[in-house]
Image (cartoon, grey):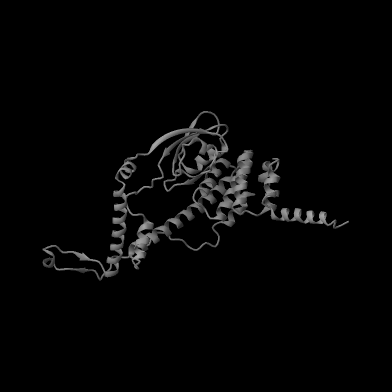
């Protein structure tokens, strides 16, 4: 049963940060020059190492600014370019991969060349989903959260209507040095300042928070699944998959998505999720072949060919039989 996988996540995990760590105060060896020596204005100087780091960041900023000024028309047009909305209707297979944004929204992460989405000429990586068709009929559902949106997209019967926000690949905070640029500039200066440590700490805390949220979503999904609330469980499992999970997390979440769709008798969506689980490294083929929650999927003609593509024991057995036949072993 899908709920039996609960012990595979969250076990033996080291304790995570329960609150943000305090950042170090500014260095105590900074000097305050007499006001008289600077025309009546007191100025606090940084330590020598920090000054070198600040200079490196300033040079990187100047270079970026000079490069932008070299293309004034293009830069100005890009800066003034507002996000715009568009509508599109596509058929399966869509050829879109989505990810969960920091705001919980659904964003286009990749577009498969030649697939339905690519042929429209509308989608670009980074575009945000604002609304989609409901699972059935002509109703439109707002993209309130990643899990619910992915549920609608996967289960949609018929053409999928999507209302999107074109973001031109722009990230919030353009015009300032990115965290990577700051880190690169300071490392090139030979100094790792407090700013780099602050960024590293924030990144670590963000990753740990995301991991804790994925584990909580998976646990909640398993509880909902056990209670027979398969649609609600799907939202939690999909939320895990949208948060850039580790391969083990992705395999477990995808397997549970497949079980949920099987229970709902949504065969194609279930087979797609099962293939995602296999691609992520799920290898318990005995469970797949015997799990009662996958019974509806096993009735499909596509089930056995799908499993045989990934089951190495089956592949090796076929190869051995071919060799025996070639050399007439056993006769």
Q: Is residue 152 at all visible to an observer of this figure? A: no
Q: Which of the pair 219/290 is nearer the observer? A: 290
Examine the image and state in which quarter residue 52 appears: bottom left
Examine the image and state in which quarter residue 198 appears: bottom left
Query: Residue 145, how many percent across, how many down?
Result: 46, 42
* Callout count: 0
Farthest top residue in view: 138
Query: Residue 105, how many percent across, how many down?
Result: 44, 43
Q: Which of the pair 323/237 is nearer the observer? A: 323
Q: Which of the pair 190/39 is nearer the observer? A: 190
Identify the residue at image location x=71%, y=40%: 301
Query: Residue 66, how many percent across, how many down?
Result: 29, 53
Q: Is residue 26 above or below residue 221?
A: below
- Horizontal placement of 100 versus 270: left or right? left
Query: Residue 54, how many percent across, how many down?
Result: 29, 62
Examine the image and state in which quarter residue 273 appears: top right
Placement of the C terminus among the 4 image quadrants: bottom right
Farthest front residue in view: 70
Farthest bottom residue in view: 29
Identify the residue at image location x=50%, y=40%: 149
Identify the residue at image location x=41%, y=58%: 203
- Horizontal placement of 177 versus 87: left or right? left
- Horizontal placement of 80 versus 316: left or right? left
């Amino acid at each position: 049963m899908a709920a039996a996988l609960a012990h595979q996540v969250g076990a033996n995990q080291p304790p995570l940060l329960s609150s943000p760590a305090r950042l170090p105060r500014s260095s105590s060896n900074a000097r305050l020059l007499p006001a008289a020596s600077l025309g009546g204005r007191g100025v606090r100087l940084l330590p020598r190492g920090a000054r070198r780091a600040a200079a490196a960041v300033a040079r990187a900023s100047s270079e970026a600014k000079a490069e932008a000024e070299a293309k004034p028309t293009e830069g100005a047009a890009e800066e003034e370019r507002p996000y715009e909305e568009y509508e599109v209707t596509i058929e399966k297979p869509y050829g879109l991969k989505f990810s969960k944004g920091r705001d919980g929204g659904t964003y286009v992460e990749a577009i498969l060349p030649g697939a339905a989405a690519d042929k429209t000429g509308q989608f670009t990586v980074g575009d945000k989903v604002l609304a989609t068709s409901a699972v059935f009929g002509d109703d439109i559902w707002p993209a309130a959260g990643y899990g619910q949106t992915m549920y609608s997209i996967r289960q949609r019967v018929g053409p999928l209507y999507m209302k999107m926000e074109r973001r031109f690949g722009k990230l919030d905070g353009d015009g300032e040095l990115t965290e990577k640029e700051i880190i690169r500039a300071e490392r090139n200066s030979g100094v790792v300042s407090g700013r780099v440590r602050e960024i590293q700490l924030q990144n670590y805390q963000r990753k740990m928070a995301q991991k804790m949220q994925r584990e909580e979503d998976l646990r909640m999904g398993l509880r909902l699944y056990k209670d027979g609330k398969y649609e609600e469980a799907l939202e939690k499992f999909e939320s895990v998959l949208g948060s850039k999970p580790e391969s083990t997390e992705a395999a477990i979440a995808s397997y549970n998505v497949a079980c949920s769709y099987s229970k709902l008798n949504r065969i194609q969506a279930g087979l797609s999720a099962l293939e995602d689980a296999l691609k992520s490294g799920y290898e318990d083929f005995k469970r797949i072949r015997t799990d009662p929650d996958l019974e509806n999927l096993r009735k499909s003609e596509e089930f056995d060919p799908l499993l045989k593509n990934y089951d190495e024991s089956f592949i090796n057995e076929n190869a051995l039989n071919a060799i025996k036949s070639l050399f007439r072993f056993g006769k």
